[in-house]
Image (cartoon, rainbow, N blue to C red):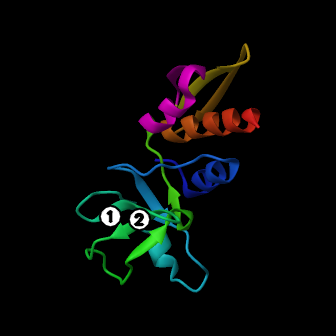
């Protein structure tokens, strides 16, 4: 799983999240909310947390199974933690390979005939860094 820091960087770079069953996220709430709530990882699931379309956008509705009182948060109050397969899919046609190199994983992508590689001990983080580069070059 990618780090919260990389997830925030991807969001700020313009990665758009359309919540789906099984997606993981953390809360990104105002400073007066306890940090414990932000550290917890939640999973979108029809039984516990569902994405609901509202006139103002998408809300993540908590269906009474959490330890603390929270009915819903807006998508802006959540940080999506995309899975490895989601990150690879977001790379689309730029993705070339994932290889194990000693104690790290190397993700190779190609953008405009330029080969780029990104290494990290966690393959999800390597994919995320490659996606960050792709997004930055698309602006």
Magenta region: which residues?
Answer: 85-102
What is the quadrant of the C terminus in the image?
top right
Could you tell me which residue is drawn at 61 percent across and 36 percent down? 131
How far across and down, in percent of the image, does residue 5 sit?
Answer: 61, 56
Crowdedness near tag 1: few (<14), some (14–19) or many (≥20) residues, C-alpha within 10 Å: many
Q: Which residue is mark 2?
A: 60
Sequence-wise first label, 2 or 1: 1
- Name the element at disc 2: strand
Q: Is residue 14 left or right of residue 23?
A: right
How far across and down, in percent of the image, does residue 21 sit?
Answer: 32, 50
Question: Foreground residue, 84 or 90?
Answer: 90
Q: Which residue is mark 1?
A: 49
Question: Foreground residue, 85 or 49?
Answer: 49
Q: Quadrant of residue 31?
A: bottom right
- Relative height, residue 66 to residue 93 (above, below): below
Spatial CA span between label 2 and label 1: 6 Å
- Relative height, residue 110 to residue 65 (above, below): above
Residues tagged 2 and 1 counted as in contact (Cβ below 8 A): yes
3 in the magenta segment: no
């Amino acid at each position: 799983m990618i780090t919260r820091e990389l997830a925030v960087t991807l969001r700020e770079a313009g990665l758009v999240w359309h919540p789906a069953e099984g997606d993981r996220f953390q809360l990104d709430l105002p400073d007066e909310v306890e940090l414990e709530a932000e550290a917890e990882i939640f999973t979108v699931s029809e039984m516990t947390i569902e994405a609901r379309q509202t006139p103002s956008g998408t809300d993540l509705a908590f269906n009474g199974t959490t330890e603390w009182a929270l009915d819903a948060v807006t998508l802006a109050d959540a940080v999506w933690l995309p899975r490895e397969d989601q990150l690879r899919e977001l790379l689309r046609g730029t993705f070339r390979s994932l290889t194990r190199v000693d104690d790290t994983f190397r993700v190779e992508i190609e953008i405009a005939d330029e080969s780029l590689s990104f290494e990290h001990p966690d393959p999800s983080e390597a994919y995320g860094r490659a996606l960050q580069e792709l997004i930055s070059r698309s602006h």
